[in-house]
Image (cartoon, rainbow, N blue to C red):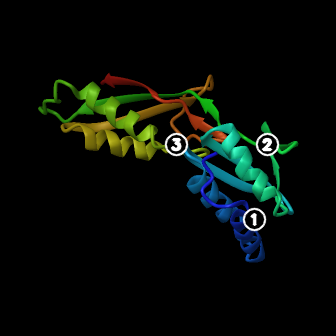
Amino acid sequence: MAVKKTLAQIRQAVHVANAFGRVTEALITLIKTEVTGVESVFVFSSGVDNYEAVIDGGADADIGNLLWACSEAGIIFTGTASVVVEGETVYFTRPVPVAVDVEVTIAPYGGEQLPTNYEALITAAIQGYAATLKIGQGILIDTWKGLVYSACSGIDTVTIRQKKGSGDWQTDDIAMAYNERPVNPVDVTVILA
C-alpha cells in the first residue's frame, strides 16, 4: 500500500478539515500525496459529508485504502468504480476518456515563408498542451491559437475548429464534464489556406 500517513493521521486530517469546511481541499491533497501514480484529482461535495472523487492514475487498491480511512472519519464516497476494503465497499470515479479533434487552418503573411516543418511544429505544440489538460478542464479556442502563433513564424491568420467525441465541429470552446479528460494524443489536422 502506498499510503504514507498512518490511518489515525489520515482520520485526524479529515476531521480537522471538516471542522474548517475544507474537506474537498484536504481530500485532493491526501489523494495526490498519499497514493502513488495519481496524475489528476477532482473532488466535489455531492451532499452533506458525501463526496465524489474522480481520480486519474493510481492503483485501485491504494485509492480504496485511503478513501476507506477517510470514510472512517465520517466521509461517504460515491462513484462509478469500487474496491472492497476491510469488508466495506469504497466508491470513487475514474475519468471518462474523450477523443478531441483539432483542425487548424493557417494563412501565411504575404511574402513570408513558413518553416518547412510547420505542420509538425503546430501539431507538437497542440498535442503537448493537450497532454497537460486535467480532469474536467475545458478546451479553449484562444489557447490553441496562441500555441499556433508561438510554434510557427510567418503566420498571418489562424482559424481553429474542434470537436469532442463524435460531436459536431465547432469554433467555440469545448466544455468537459467533471469526469472527462481528453484522450492523448489529440488528433490534429493542419491546413494551409
Q: Give SS at disc 3.
A: loop
- Circles 1 and 3: CB distance less than 8 Å? no
Amino acid of disc 2: Gly
Location of residue 91 by image quarter:
top right
Q: Can you give x and y, in whole percent of width and height, for residue 100 in the image? A: 53, 29
The residue pinned by badge 3 equals 139
User: Which of the two labelled residues, at mark 3 and mark 2, occupies the earlier sequence position?
Assistant: 2
Observer-nearest of 71 and 40: 71
For discs 3 and 2, the disc positioned in front in the rendered view: 2
Amino acid of disc 3: Ile
Task: Decide: is 171 above or below 16.
Answer: above
Residue drawn 72% across the image and 60% down it? 7
Q: Can you give x and y, in whole percent of width and height, for residue 98 in the image? A: 60, 30
Answer left or right for 137 relative to 23.
left
- Badge 2 local density, few (<14 within 10 Å), some, or many (20+)? some
Q: Give SS at disc 2.
A: loop
The residue pinned by badge 2 equals 79
